[in-house]
């Protein structure tokens, strides 16, 4: 099922590379446009995503404070704030909303059926019922998917390869996250087939996360796996610091965890989805409709290793593993 969905995504992406040049010729920009920025996290936790988005806009000739303005709304890790923040952007009458993560996309869609929405770093928008189909989304929302639930099996395989003696794993997730549920189904199947005993830890809020992390060492895991969702992404520094404190090797789905001190990541480049989202913002501001812009599959996957963290944990990677990494942080 997952493989079929991925092939379906890939088929839709085939002609995407040629679109921007065609679209930019359709309609000149004649006014200062305002973009609403709506995300689950904080300026610190989304700094890489924002930088990638601004970089994508700059490549298309947009400069914040010059020919575009951005209205920022940060939920600061509190998903419950998103509907109010989305409504504020609607009241501000922004020209377009950039919604980060599935909760942000859902809040934006609930707030308006008229203002165009480009979602980045999101889950399956069809399963979330935010679009009618991948090829022709319909309505006012389209976007760039960052979930690839099958990659959690690869993350477990990586840990099994570099730590063959480890037979127990701690898995941290947010059980109300649609993407985390898909990843957990895959992780559970892989663990059962490969003799890995899994202890599952659920956290949905920051206080709960801190309490849960304190109990992880009790199951004596050989390593930690974190399942992807916007909440875990927002509070990744809390998770990374706890793993380091407990001297627990860990693997994550996004490189931002490794940039913030995590040991290994493998998965979609979430920053790439924000960079690519700028192209759809450009096309919509020039007159195209979100309803006609296909939802896009993640195209960039990366393995990132933090040698400094590994050394602090007393762990050395085999050279055969390091040569496969897309980036090694020293």
Image (cartoon, rainbow, N blue to C red):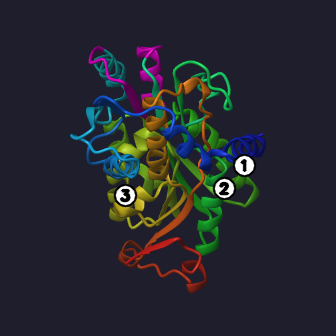
| Picture quarter with the N terminus | top right
Which label belongs to residue 189? 1
Is residue 164 visible in the rendered image? The answer is no
Q: Pick whichever of labels 3 and 2 is earlier in the sequence.
A: 2
Q: Is residue 4 left or right of residue 117?
A: right
Which span of residues is magenta-colored? 91-114
- The residue wearing badge 2 is 153
Sequence-wise, the earlier of marks 3 and 1 is: 1
Residue drawn 42% across the image and 22% down it: 108
**Is 320 or 17 nearer to us in this picture?**
17
Given residues 62 and 184, the one toward you in this image is: 62
Give the class, few, some or many, for how many residues have Cα within 10 Å of label 1's Cα (few <14, many ≥20). Answer: few
Tell me residue 131's x, y (percent).
60, 24
Q: CA distance from mark 2 to mark 1?
A: 9 Å
Query: Marks 3/2: CA distance?
Result: 21 Å
Left or right, residue 322 beside residue 167: left
| Foreground pick, 309 / 69 | 69
The answer to the question of whether label 2 and label 1 lie on touching residues, with beta carbons closer than 8 A, is yes
Q: Is residue 256 above or below residue 159?
A: above
Image height check: is 197 above or below 291?
A: below
249 with respect to 267 (left or right): left
Would you name the residue on which mark 3 appears?
240
Query: Residue placed at 35% from the left, 21% from the top?
Result: 86
User: Looking at the rendering, in which quadrant would you find the C terminus?
Assistant: bottom left
Sequence-earlier tag: 2 or 1? 2
Q: Residues within 10 Å of mark 3 (few under 14, many from 20)?
A: many
Q: Position of residue 314 (x, y in %)?
A: 41, 79
């Amino acid at each position: 099922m997952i493989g079929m969905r991925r092939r379906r995504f890939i088929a839709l992406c085939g002609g995407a590379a040629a679109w921007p040049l065609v679209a930019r010729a359709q309609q000149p920009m004649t006014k200062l446009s305002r973009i609403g920025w709506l995300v689950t996290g904080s300026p610190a936790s989304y700094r890489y995503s924002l930088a990638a988005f601004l970089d994508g806009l700059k490549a298309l000739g947009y400069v914040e404070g010059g020919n575009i303005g951005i209205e920022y709304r940060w939920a600061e890790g509190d998903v419950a704030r998103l509907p109010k923040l989305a409504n504020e952007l609607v009241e501000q009458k922004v020209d377009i909303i950039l919604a980060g993560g599935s909760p942000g996309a859902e809040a934006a869609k609930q707030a308006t059926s008229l203002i165009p929405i480009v979602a980045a770093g999101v889950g399956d928008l069809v399963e979330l019922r935010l679009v009618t189909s991948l090829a022709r989304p319909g309505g006012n929302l389209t976007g760039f998917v960052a979930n690839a639930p099958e990659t959690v099996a690869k993350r477990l395989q990586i840990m099994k390869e570099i730590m063959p003696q480890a037979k127990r794993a701690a898995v941290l997730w947010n059980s109300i996250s649609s993407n985390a549920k898909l990843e957990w189904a895959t992780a559970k199947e892989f663990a059962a087939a490969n003799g890995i005993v899994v202890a599952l830890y659920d956290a949905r809020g920051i206080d709960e996360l801190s309490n849960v992390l304190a109990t992880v060492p009790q199951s004596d895991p050989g390593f930690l796996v974190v399942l992807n969702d916007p909440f875990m992404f927002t509070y990744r520094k809390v998770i990374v610091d706890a793993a380091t404190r407990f001297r627990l090797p860990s693997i994550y789905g996004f490189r931002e965890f490794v940039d913030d001190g995590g040991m290994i990541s493998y998965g979609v480049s979430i920053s790439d989805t924000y960079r690519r989202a700028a192209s759809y913002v450009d096309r919509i501001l020039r007159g195209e409709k979100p309803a006609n812009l296909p939802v896009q599959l993640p195209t960039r996957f990366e393995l990132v290793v933090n040698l400094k963290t590994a050394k602090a944990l007393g762990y050395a990677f085999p050279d055969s593993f390091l040569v496969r990494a897309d980036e090694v942080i020293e």
